[in-house]
Image (cartoon, grey):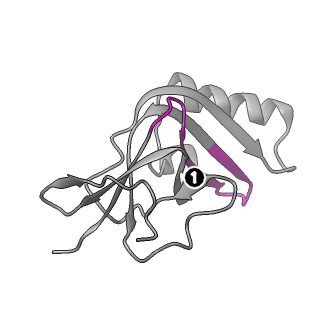
Amino acid sequence: MSIFYRITPINKKSIDFSCDVIAEDGRTCTITQRYSYGQGFLPLNDKDKRNERGSIECDLDLGWGAELDELESTQFEFDDAFTDIDKQVFKNLWNEHDVGLDDQPEHGWRIDNYRLVIYEPVLWELANDEQVTPKADANPSH
Protein backbone atom coordinates (compact mmCIF):
# COMPACT_ATOMS: atom_id res chain seq x y z
CA MET A 1 0.00 0.00 0.00
CA SER A 2 1.51 3.31 -1.06
CA ILE A 3 1.42 6.47 1.02
CA PHE A 4 1.02 9.86 -0.64
CA TYR A 5 -0.17 13.38 0.04
CA ARG A 6 -3.76 14.49 -0.35
CA ILE A 7 -3.73 18.21 -1.16
CA THR A 8 -6.80 20.33 -0.47
CA PRO A 9 -6.91 24.06 -1.21
CA ILE A 10 -7.71 26.34 1.70
CA ASN A 11 -9.24 29.07 -0.48
CA LYS A 12 -12.19 28.68 -2.83
CA LYS A 13 -11.59 28.89 -6.58
CA SER A 14 -8.08 27.47 -6.25
CA ILE A 15 -8.24 24.39 -8.49
CA ASP A 16 -7.68 24.31 -12.26
CA PHE A 17 -8.41 21.21 -14.28
CA SER A 18 -7.18 21.50 -17.84
CA CYS A 19 -6.72 19.44 -20.96
CA ASP A 20 -5.73 19.77 -24.59
CA VAL A 21 -8.38 19.09 -27.21
CA ILE A 22 -7.05 17.95 -30.58
CA ALA A 23 -9.36 18.12 -33.58
CA GLU A 24 -9.14 15.61 -36.44
CA ASP A 25 -7.57 18.31 -38.62
CA GLY A 26 -4.80 18.97 -36.07
CA ARG A 27 -6.16 22.19 -34.55
CA THR A 28 -5.77 22.37 -30.78
CA CYS A 29 -7.48 24.10 -27.92
CA THR A 30 -6.46 24.12 -24.27
CA ILE A 31 -9.41 24.20 -21.90
CA THR A 32 -9.00 25.22 -18.26
CA GLN A 33 -11.86 24.84 -15.83
CA ARG A 34 -11.65 26.56 -12.44
CA TYR A 35 -13.40 24.89 -9.50
CA SER A 36 -14.21 26.05 -5.98
CA TYR A 37 -13.65 22.71 -4.28
CA GLY A 38 -11.76 19.49 -4.81
CA GLN A 39 -8.54 17.69 -4.00
CA GLY A 40 -5.37 16.42 -5.59
CA PHE A 41 -2.68 13.88 -4.79
CA LEU A 42 1.10 13.88 -4.93
CA PRO A 43 3.70 11.19 -4.14
CA LEU A 44 5.70 11.76 -0.97
CA ASN A 45 8.98 12.19 -2.83
CA ASP A 46 7.75 14.16 -5.84
CA LYS A 47 8.68 17.78 -5.18
CA ASP A 48 9.16 18.59 -8.89
CA LYS A 49 5.49 19.38 -9.31
CA ARG A 50 5.59 22.23 -6.77
CA ASN A 51 6.74 25.48 -8.29
CA GLU A 52 7.76 28.94 -7.19
CA ARG A 53 4.46 30.49 -8.36
CA GLY A 54 2.57 28.88 -5.51
CA SER A 55 0.95 26.07 -7.46
CA ILE A 56 1.17 22.30 -7.30
CA GLU A 57 0.60 20.06 -10.31
CA CYS A 58 -1.03 16.95 -8.91
CA ASP A 59 -0.59 13.34 -10.00
CA LEU A 60 -3.83 12.18 -11.61
CA ASP A 61 -2.87 8.51 -11.24
CA LEU A 62 -2.88 8.66 -7.43
CA GLY A 63 -5.74 8.68 -4.98
CA TRP A 64 -9.44 8.26 -5.55
CA GLY A 65 -10.29 11.21 -7.77
CA ALA A 66 -10.27 14.98 -7.64
CA GLU A 67 -13.92 15.24 -6.51
CA LEU A 68 -14.23 18.63 -8.23
CA ASP A 69 -17.26 20.69 -7.29
CA GLU A 70 -18.76 24.06 -8.23
CA LEU A 71 -17.40 24.90 -11.66
CA GLU A 72 -16.61 28.63 -11.55
CA SER A 73 -15.32 29.32 -15.07
CA THR A 74 -14.10 27.77 -18.29
CA GLN A 75 -11.29 29.34 -20.31
CA PHE A 76 -10.44 28.41 -23.91
CA GLU A 77 -7.04 28.95 -25.54
CA PHE A 78 -7.39 28.28 -29.27
CA ASP A 79 -4.52 27.93 -31.71
CA ASP A 80 -4.41 30.35 -34.65
CA ALA A 81 -6.11 27.88 -37.03
CA PHE A 82 -9.52 28.45 -35.39
CA THR A 83 -11.67 31.13 -36.96
CA ASP A 84 -13.90 33.28 -34.74
CA ILE A 85 -16.91 31.27 -35.90
CA ASP A 86 -15.12 27.96 -35.18
CA LYS A 87 -14.29 29.21 -31.68
CA GLN A 88 -17.88 30.13 -30.94
CA VAL A 89 -19.23 26.83 -32.27
CA PHE A 90 -16.71 24.90 -30.16
CA LYS A 91 -17.47 26.90 -27.00
CA ASN A 92 -21.20 26.44 -27.47
CA LEU A 93 -20.81 22.71 -28.01
CA TRP A 94 -18.57 22.38 -24.95
CA ASN A 95 -20.69 24.52 -22.60
CA GLU A 96 -24.27 24.02 -23.71
CA HIS A 97 -24.20 20.31 -24.41
CA ASP A 98 -22.07 19.34 -21.43
CA VAL A 99 -19.80 17.17 -23.57
CA GLY A 100 -17.35 16.92 -20.71
CA LEU A 101 -13.73 15.93 -20.57
CA ASP A 102 -13.93 12.66 -22.48
CA ASP A 103 -12.86 11.95 -26.03
CA GLN A 104 -15.63 12.95 -28.39
CA PRO A 105 -15.11 11.04 -31.64
CA GLU A 106 -18.61 11.97 -32.79
CA HIS A 107 -17.53 15.63 -32.61
CA GLY A 108 -14.16 14.96 -34.26
CA TRP A 109 -11.76 15.48 -31.37
CA ARG A 110 -9.73 13.65 -28.79
CA ILE A 111 -8.60 14.89 -25.40
CA ASP A 112 -5.05 14.60 -24.14
CA ASN A 113 -2.67 15.92 -21.49
CA TYR A 114 -4.97 16.23 -18.49
CA ARG A 115 -3.62 18.45 -15.69
CA LEU A 116 -4.82 19.28 -12.19
CA VAL A 117 -3.23 22.31 -10.54
CA ILE A 118 -3.99 23.49 -7.01
CA TYR A 119 -2.94 26.94 -5.83
CA GLU A 120 -1.48 27.51 -2.37
CA PRO A 121 -2.22 27.84 0.47
CA VAL A 122 -3.18 24.19 0.81
CA LEU A 123 -3.73 21.57 3.46
CA TRP A 124 -1.30 18.63 3.20
CA GLU A 125 -2.52 15.29 4.57
CA LEU A 126 -0.93 11.87 4.44
CA ALA A 127 -3.16 9.34 2.73
CA ASN A 128 -3.28 5.87 1.29
CA ASP A 129 -6.00 4.09 -0.62
CA GLU A 130 -7.94 3.45 2.59
CA GLN A 131 -7.63 6.51 4.84
CA VAL A 132 -6.40 10.07 5.31
CA THR A 133 -4.24 11.10 8.27
CA PRO A 134 -4.12 14.86 8.94
CA LYS A 135 -0.59 16.26 8.86
CA ALA A 136 -0.01 19.12 11.28
CA ASP A 137 2.84 20.61 9.24
CA ALA A 138 1.74 22.22 5.97
CA ASN A 139 5.29 21.89 4.60
CA PRO A 140 5.81 18.56 2.80
CA SER A 141 9.62 18.85 2.90
CA HIS A 142 9.81 16.84 6.14
- Expressed as whole percent of the image width and height from the top left, the position of residue 121 reads 53, 44
Is 78 or 67 nearer to us in this picture?
67
In magenta stretch: residue 113: no
Quadrant of the snapshot with the C terminus: bottom left
Question: Which residue is at 72% across, 60% downward?
Answer: 26
Q: Is residue 127 left or right of residue 120?
A: left
Q: Is residue 96 left or right of residue 25?
A: left
In magenta stretch: residue 25: yes
Question: Which residue is at 47% across, 52% downward?
Answer: 103
Is 76 or 123 nearer to us in this picture?
123
Question: Can residue 111 be seen at all in this image of the molecule?
Answer: no
**Label 1: which secondary element:** strand
Q: Which residues are magenta?
A: 10-31
Disc 1: CA contacts within 10 A as few (<14), some (14-19) or many (>=20): some
Q: Label 1 amino acid? A: Cys
Q: Which residue is mark 1?
A: 19
Is 43 or 72 nearer to us in this picture?
43
Q: To which quarter of the image does residue 111 belong? A: bottom right
Question: Which residue is at 67% across, 35% downward?
Answer: 75
| Residue 2 sits above or below residue 82 on the image | below
- Expressed as whole percent of the image width and height from the top left, the position of residue 104 reads 49, 47
- Expressed as whole percent of the image width and height from the top left, the position of residue 37 reads 42, 33
Question: Which residue is at 49% across, 51% downward?
Answer: 105
| Residue 42 sits above or below residue 34 on the image | below
Quadrant of the snapshot with the N terminus: bottom left
Q: Is residue 89 left or right of residue 64?
A: right
Q: Is residue 90 left or right of residue 8?
A: right
Question: Can residue 114 be seen at all in this image of the molecule?
Answer: yes
